[in-house]
Amino acid sequence: MRARWVAALDKNLLSTVLPVEYLLPRVVDDRGRIVLIASTSALDGRGGPYATAKAAVAGYGRDLALRAGARGITANVVVPGFVSGTGFFEVGGYGTPNSAMLEQAAAGTLVGRVGTPRDVTHIVTKLLSVDAGWITGQLISPNGGMVLH
């Protein structure tokens, strides 16, 4: 059990924290943008070690915003819901989502569909832009209404 938790924290938390902490001192003041990726599992608690690690990413993003804000650097966390076509399930060892899984996920949203990579990249791109200099410390969750917060 310990190995499962350590592996989840290493893969889903430390793989985010360590590169950011290394690069943060090198980010140019007033122009830096940091966007982290969590998961709606962080909001609803489903997913055991994975959900816990992604919840920690969300907390870390807020900590970053507090620390970097005085330098004009923004830090936000995108918290996507079910996104098809990413390879997430295959890499995670869950196999390829079948049509029943996709239908169930779509039915769990208010808009009646699962997300696409574009649904997420659109938000990330906006948060990385120079125009997003007044958005920081936020959890932004493109999830089709799967999780309301």
Image: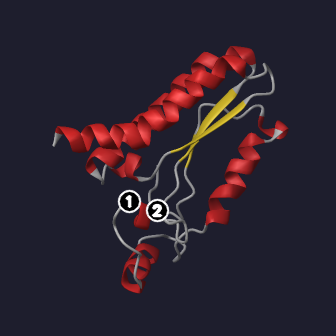
The quarter of the image holding the N terminus is top left
Residue at 55% of width from left, 71% of height from top? 85
Circle 2 sits on which residue? Answer: 88
- What x and y, as percent, mark residue 73? 72, 24
- In the image, residue 118 above or below residue 131: below
Pointer 1 with pointer 2, Cβ within 8 A: yes
Instruction: Count residues near mark 2 (Cα–Cα under 10 Å), then give few for <14, some for 14-19, many for 20+.
Output: some
- What x and y, as percent, mark residue 32? 75, 28
Residue at 71% of width from left, 19% of height from top? 26
Circle 1 sits on which residue? Answer: 92
Most distant residue in the left direction: 1
- What x and y, as percent, mark residue 39? 46, 51
The image quarter in which residue 14 lies: top left
Disc 1 versus disc 2: distance between alpha carbons? 6 Å
Disc 1 element: loop
The image quarter in which residue 135 lies: top right
| Amino acid, disc 2 | Phe
The answer to whether 88 appears left or right of 53 in the picture is right
Instruction: Count residues near mark 1 (Cα–Cα under 10 Å), then give few for <14, some for 14-19, many for 20+.
Output: few
- In the image, residue 53 above or below residue 62: below
Residue at 24% of width from left, 45% of height from top? 4
The answer to whether 53 appears left or right of 37 in the picture is left
Most distant residue in the bottom direction: 99
64 or 22, which lies in front? Answer: 22
Disc 2 element: helix
| Amino acid, disc 1 | Gly
Numbered circle sitting on residue 76: none
- In the image, residue 91 above or below residue 73: below
